[in-house]
Image: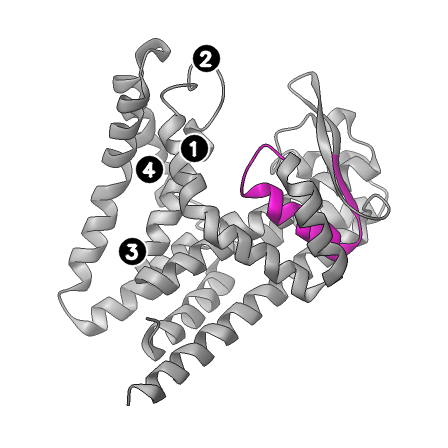
Amino acid sequence: MPTPSLAFGALAGVALDRLLGEPRHGHPLVGFGRLAGWLESRLNHEGRGRKAAGLAAWALAVLPWVALAWGLQTLHPALAWGMDVVLLAFALGARSLDEHLIAVARPLAAGDLTAAREAVSRIVSRDPAALTEEGIARAAVESALENGHDAIFGALFWFALLGGPGALLFRLANTLDALWGYRTPRFQRFGWAAARMDDCLGYPSARLTALTYALLGATRGALACWRNQAPDWDSPNAGPVMAAGAGALKVSLGGAAIYHGRAEHRPPLGLGPAPLAGDIHRALGLVRQGVALWLAALIALALLLGAIHA
């Protein structure tokens, strides 16, 4: 049950992320990535690790840090609240998402496709050289919508349920999915646990994110896109989020994209024209409005439950 303390901790965590953003040097996730690489080299030697090894590696990489965070919170109530704020700020990437996408939108609006391609290459894995103006905008809007969940709403959801350790759990699991959750010969079996854990942890928050986008945009179209288009998408969580977001913004996403020299034909998402530079700002605005809505709802719910139990 969310308490007023937890709700205002969420507000403080979001504010801290907006103020500081992610560390430019010495980011804790760099160290976590090294740990993940070390575990993978030991338990997935030459890609021979099976699903059980992948699950063991996931548990060894994630659970000790979550347990440590939980244990430290028991030492003192003031320490617990402060840790909640810091852990949520660590788990969030709202300012970073803004910075990366605005770095794409500005040169794109100015007609500087070279700079826009270079900027978008930092946030997506598709080949930037083949991207047109519409392709760059499409990649950026898709990143804004999907990472709105992965970098913000997923962490907020688990924070509301479990406090700072819950936000930490989601962020580390999402990071491991980005490192191991590939359908390649090397990770087909070993990465299965990382992919499935990320799917499970993100399942409820992804649907709440999709609903948030729908409520704050073109609601009827967003819900129709979610219902009709999301099942065709490979990811059970990215599908609803991106379909609803595209419908809310009244733009068309998905379609063909080139990854590592190979064309991939992805199902279409949304309704309307292809996105342009201005739609990147609209997508970021949708995410920001969603954060404000979630914080207001969390505070209102905590105060209501507090009054009921007073």
* Closest to the observer, 270 or 7: 270
Q: Amino acid at mark 2?
A: Pro
The residue tagged with tag 1: helix, strand or loop?
Answer: helix
Q: Are marks 2 and 3 in contact (CB under 8 Å)?
A: no
Q: Amino acid at mark 3?
A: Pro
Who's the residue at 72% across and 62% down the image? 219
- The quarter of the image holding the C terminus is bottom left
Q: CA distance from mark 2 to mark 3?
A: 33 Å
**Can you say whether 193 is above or below 303 in the image?**
above
Residue for badge 3: 165
Residue for badge 4: 32
Q: Residues within 10 Å of mark 4 (few under 14, many from 20)?
A: some
Who's the residue at 67% across and 48% down the image? 227
Who's the residue at 13% across and 65% down the image? 75
The residue tagged with tag 2: helix, strand or loop?
Answer: loop
Q: Amino acid at mark 4?
A: Phe
Query: In x, y percent, where is residue 10?
Result: 41, 68
Left or right, residue 114 beside residue 211: right
Which label lies toward us, 2 or 4?
2
Residue for badge 1: 195
300 falls in the magenta region = no
Q: CA distance from mark 1 to mark 4?
A: 17 Å
Q: Earlier in the sequence, mark 4 or mark 3?
A: 4
